[in-house]
Image (tube, rainbow, N blue to C red):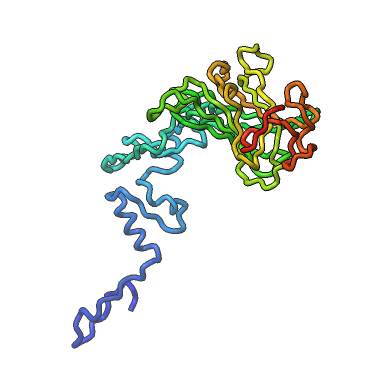
């Protein structure tokens, strides 16, 4: 039937069955209905063909161009190294309250202890240069006693010298002996050591110590090997003591050399000066360096003075069965022979 004429009603059929079908809905019908409700709702929904489809989350009648016109972002340039935890600049709440939209406040994060809020960069602290081998924030450690400074050298005249630098604080301790590191001699085999012993001032306990002896004591040389060849163990030895400062100091800072004295280490492993010559006053020669040097010299036969040594041929050239010159005093030998 024509559209203007009402539909014909068939007999025996309910009028509900003759209800005309609903008009065909356009693809944008649902969106149009939502658009009709946009006057009531604060949010607008647009179709995909609309240019504002990407801004459907914005409030009604508030376009990005209007937002940029209303809001002037005036944030200062911050250094890239700063860590920002604040929210970006927010527009005034009055601009967002459109069509009765309630005013909401945005939460702003607060910097924690391990983050720095934006602000002027602090100048870097200057690094303090520490001397090489030092540790920061540590107390100064007391230097240990110098017992390893042993130097050996051979002179142009053939004499061999061993110098031992000793810490003078050893003289104020309660030790009973000070021992040098081991060293070797060119004319004898095995290891040798020099020893300092305090003068015994009291037979009671603690009487033999450097502290009780007030810096006085004696020097001994010990061979740590059992020498089988007597001729390899017989040496002409000379001892001297001086301060640890320059060698040009006056005579009050050094003791004259004592010796030479012949000693057979194959017969007796420890050498010491004869009675009356064995005591040294170490404390008297100590200077500001707080060290003193004990020197041991091994003299070759060519340097033995006939006025200082008993008469006879040089060691090892005599007819004696021990290879010793006849009439020479041998310290430590059981059959020591005095000069004729």
List the single residue furthest toward the bottom.
12
Viewer-side residue, 87 vs 212: 212
Residue 123 horizontal side relative to residue 334, left or right: left
Residue 215 horizontal side relative to residue 265, left or right: left
40 vs 154: above or below:
below
Residue 60 horizontal side relative to residue 291, left or right: left
Viewer-side residue, 160 vs 205: 205
Q: Quarter holding the C terminus?
A: top right
The x and y percentages for residue 12 are 18, 88
| Residue at x 36% of width, y 38% of height | 112
Q: Residue 84's quadrant in the figure?
A: top left
Q: Residue 85's quadrant in the figure?
A: top left
The x and y percentages for residue 178 are 53, 32
Q: Residue 293's quadrant in the figure?
A: top right
The x and y percentages for residue 169 are 50, 24
The total of numbered circles placed on residues is 0
The x and y percentages for residue 164 are 62, 29
| Residue at x 65% of width, y 34% of height | 336
Q: Quarter holding the N terminus?
A: bottom left
| Residue at x 47% of width, y 35% of height | 82
| Residue at x 40% of width, y 36% of height | 89
Residue 104 horizontal side relative to residue 51, left or right: left
């Amino acid at each position: 039937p024509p559209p203007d004429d009402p539909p014909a009603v068939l007999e025996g059929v309910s009028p509900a069955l003759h209800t005309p079908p609903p008009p065909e809905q356009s693809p944008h019908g649902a969106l149009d209905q939502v658009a009709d409700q946009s006057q009531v709702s604060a949010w607008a929904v647009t179709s995909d063909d609309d240019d504002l489809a990407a801004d459907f989350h914005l409030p009604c009648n508030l376009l990005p161009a209007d937002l940029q016109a209303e809001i002037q972002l005036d944030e200062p340039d911050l250094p890239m190294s700063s860590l920002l935890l604040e929210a970006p600049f927010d527009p005034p709440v009055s601009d967002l309250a459109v069509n009765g939209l309630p005013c909401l406040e945005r939460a702003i994060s607060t910097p924690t202890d391990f983050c720095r809020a934006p602000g002027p960069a602090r100048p870097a602290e200057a690094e303090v240069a520490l001397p090489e081998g030092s540790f920061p924030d540590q107390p100064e450690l007391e230097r240990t006693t110098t017992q390893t400074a042993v130097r050996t050298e051979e002179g142009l005249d053939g004499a061999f010298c061993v110098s031992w630098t000793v810490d003078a604080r050893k003289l104020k301790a309660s030790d009973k002996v000070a021992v040098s590191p081991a060293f070797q001699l060119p004319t004898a085999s095995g290891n040798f050591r020099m020893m300092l012993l305090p003068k015994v001032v009291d037979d009671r306990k603690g009487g033999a110590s450097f502290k009780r002896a007030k810096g006085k004591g004696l020097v001994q040389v010990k061979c740590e090997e059992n020498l089988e060849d007597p001729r390899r163990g017989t040496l002409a030895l000379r001892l001297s003591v001086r301060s640890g400062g320059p060698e040009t100091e006056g005579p009050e800072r050094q003791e004259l050399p004592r010796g030479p004295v012949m000693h057979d280490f194959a017969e007796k492993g420890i050498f010491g000066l004869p009675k009356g010559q064995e005591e040294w006053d170490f404390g008297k020669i100590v200077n500001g360096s707080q060290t003193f040097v004990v020197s041991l010299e091994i003299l070759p036969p060519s340097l033995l003075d006939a006025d200082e040594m008993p008469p006879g041929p040089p060691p090892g050239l005599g007819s004696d069965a021990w290879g010793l010159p006849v009439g020479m005093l041998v310290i430590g030998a059981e059959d020591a022979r005095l000069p004729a």
